[in-house]
Image: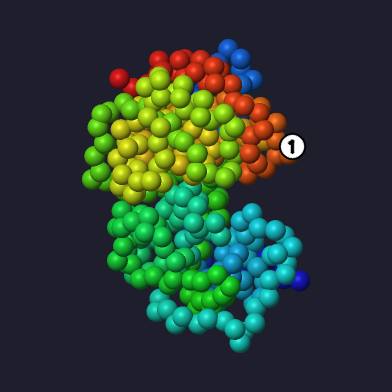
Amino acid sequence: MAETIPIAEAAEDCVTLETCELTDAFFAGGADGIARDRGANPFLGWRASPTTLRAWRLRDVVLDRDHMVLLKDGRVLAETVYLQSPDSIAALRVDPDRLERPGIAGVAATCFDHWDANYYHWLAHSVPTVHAIRSRHGDAATLIVPRLWPWQAATLDRLGAGGMRRLPTELGRKYALAEAEYYEFAAGRADFSVSALSRAAYERMAEGIAPEPPMGRRLYIDRGNAANRRIPNEAALVAALRARGFEIVRPEERDIDGQIALFRAAGMVVGQLGAGLANIAFCRPGTVVYEIVPEHHANPCFLAMAMQSGLRYWADLFPTGAAQPDHTSAWHADIDVAAVLRRIGELEAFVPR
């Protein structure tokens, strides 16, 4: 079985990228929020995690592409493991005769996790990592990337990293890296922290993109195409929100510039946990974000993202009838449309004018 060791035991050196402070959650309406029914918001009393984010310099390591973990002398570097099965990590083996040896001149840096095609993961993990790599090395480093979708390549262009050398990687392969850097953003280390570096990366992406008029738009992120966390009566919710003046949007139908322009114009964004909600990273400070939280998966990652962007966030927990906690199950119970509209009515007082 593969042994797991701390990355510090294998690293040549490390650099501190930033230190995130312990931060009390703040909500629309002030410290106590707007709700009389305080139990409705599952994140009241939540605190953003303090953490120090580092870049580690390594020599003679192996990248396992399937798991996006690094190994040194056959041992897994613990900080590179991100939500993988312990059994699958323990079973990793390195066959020297089957290694790819790309022969990169200079440092190569990994910049994504094993869910690389997910928009949230790319924005939350890869975008800050690439921004940090380019801030440190300019165009001198090589980015270790997946086979890029056009929208992913566009994010690199927006970060000014479109001209950097890239090593495209393939599933099922392992790569021997003579000199590598590992950035802790890639393993979700900042997901529940208020990261100034992440904020700077999103601002860099949005440079030069004007908000798409009119300003103050009310957006509902429709998950009609999604298989996960489907709401049975979402059509009724959509109809009610449309009647209230909301635009029903599917962000994935726009290119990156279009998504940034749309969310920079938003005054209020409503949605449930999902990749499309990651676009709140591009909202202007003060934008109201209302997250509909399924009881079987209350995850504060978007609260953390809203806090780092200075947004006015609120969340309500809704019963779903799901049998067990996970991040994929569909809702079995209808959502209370009237309750959603009542909460929106309270939150509208905080929409920027």
Quadrant, the C terminus:
top left
Residue at horizontal 55%, vertical 70%?
Answer: 171
In the picture as drawn, the residue positioned furthest to the right comes out as: 1
Q: Position of residue 62 (x, y in %)?
A: 57, 74
Residue at horizontal 31%, vertical 44%?
Answer: 258
Element carrying mark 1: loop
Front residue (pair 76, 13) = 76
Residue at horizontal 25%, vertical 29%?
Answer: 214
Q: Within 10 angstroms of label 1, few (less than 14), some, or many (20 or more) residues? A: few
Front residue (pair 322, 144) = 322
Q: Position of residue 18 (x, y in %)?
A: 46, 49
Q: Which residue is mark 1?
A: 323
The residue type indicated by label 1 comes to Ala
**For this view, does 224 lie left or right of residue 284?**
right
Number of marks drawn: 1
Q: Position of residue 104 (x, y in %)?
A: 42, 79
Is 29 drawn above or below residue 272 in the view shown? above
Is 173 drawn above or below residue 315 in the view shown? below
Is 325 drawn above or below residue 181 in the view shown? above
Residue 16 visible in the current orientation: no
